[in-house]
Image (tube, helix red, strand yellow):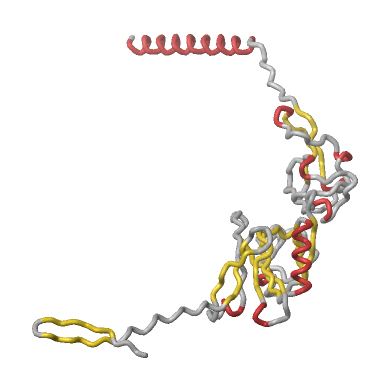
Amino acid sequence: MARMRIFIVFALALTVGGAFAFATYRYVQKLPAQQGTKIATRPVVIAVADLQLGAALRAQDLRAIDWPAEAVPAGAFGKVDEVVGRGLIFPVVQNEVIVPGKLASKEAGAGLPPAIPEGFRALSVRVNDVIGVAGYVLPGTHVDVVATVNPTSQQPDVTSKVILTDVQVLAAGTRIERDAEQNKPVAVSVVTLMVDPVQAERLTLASTEGKIQLALRNPLDQTKPETPGIRPAVLMGSAIARPIAVRGGARRASAAPAAPVAAAPAPSPTIEIIRGDKRTSEVVRQE
């Protein structure tokens, strides 16, 4: 009798569970299918591989992909034909969107010239391993230019002075892009600097009339200190630098001998006279 009751309860539970599962299945089947949300897109031109500064864009360097319309960068191009043949004024990495700010104008072409900002010039100077800081003067680095010039052809007048500060290097040799393997030194004989016309005059005169030296600097350092320059006498300590007024109210330091210090006059001879308990001093006058 007890076994019969257990069997009835089990059969009833199985029947009710099956009926509930079937009803749930039928309910889910009758629900309307939900449509997936579609994201609006538009074609955008991107770079297929890393492209260097000055490169002329070719069709094989680019491709168009669908990009979310709400996230398209301002000015992005939609067709590859719109940018083929234009030069890059900034490097581009793989899969980066091509925007107008990265490109030179259609008439500018490719290479170094389009990378020169308006109002600046590219000026090349001859260097060696010492002047070029052992090959670490690379495109994109910043340098100071130190000139050593003898304005009067007399050895004491030889002067070294920083004539340009925080000058950007455009090219090292014929390279206008850094080595892909993390700024390896490059041995070159010519370095091209980006200068304005006034700086171009100073640099040309310094390299023609004397010698120049490049001083590599931290690109985050924006200071431009004014230096007085130095001459051999000051360098060796045989003279001191003193400011000298020049045209325009500016002042500069130049080597000058120290002014002699006047000797103190020798004291006059005196004698001491004792009269009883009194003492007096008398100055002896010499005729």
Q: Quadrant of residue 278?
A: bottom left
Q: Position of residue 152 (x, y in %)?
A: 72, 77
Q: In this image, 34 relative to 192: left or right? A: left
Of residues 220 and 111, the one nearer the viewer is 220
Residue occupying image coordinates x 61% and y 61%? 226
Q: In this image, 42 relative to 5: left or right? A: right
Residue occupying image coordinates x 82% and y 44%? 62
| Residue most extreme to the bottom | 287
Residue occupying image coordinates x 52% and y 77%? 259
Q: Is residue 36 above or below residue 253?
A: above
Of residues 167 and 237, the one nearer the viewer is 237
Q: In this image, 143 relative to 102: left or right? A: left
Q: Position of residue 201 (x, y in %)?
A: 78, 63
Q: Is residue 184 visible?
A: no
Q: Is residue 187 visible?
A: yes
Q: In this image, 2 relative to 56: left or right? A: left
Q: Quadrant of residue 229?
A: bottom right
Quadrant position of the C terminus in the picture: bottom left
Q: Position of residue 8 (x, y in %)?
A: 41, 9
Q: Is residue 155 above or below residue 39?
A: below
Residue occupying image coordinates x 70% and y 31%? 71
Q: Position of residue 203 (x, y in %)?
A: 75, 65
Q: Is residue 56 above or below residue 183?
A: above
| Residue most extreme to the left | 276
Quadrant position of the N terminus in the picture: top left
Of residues 137 and 29, the one nearer the viewer is 137
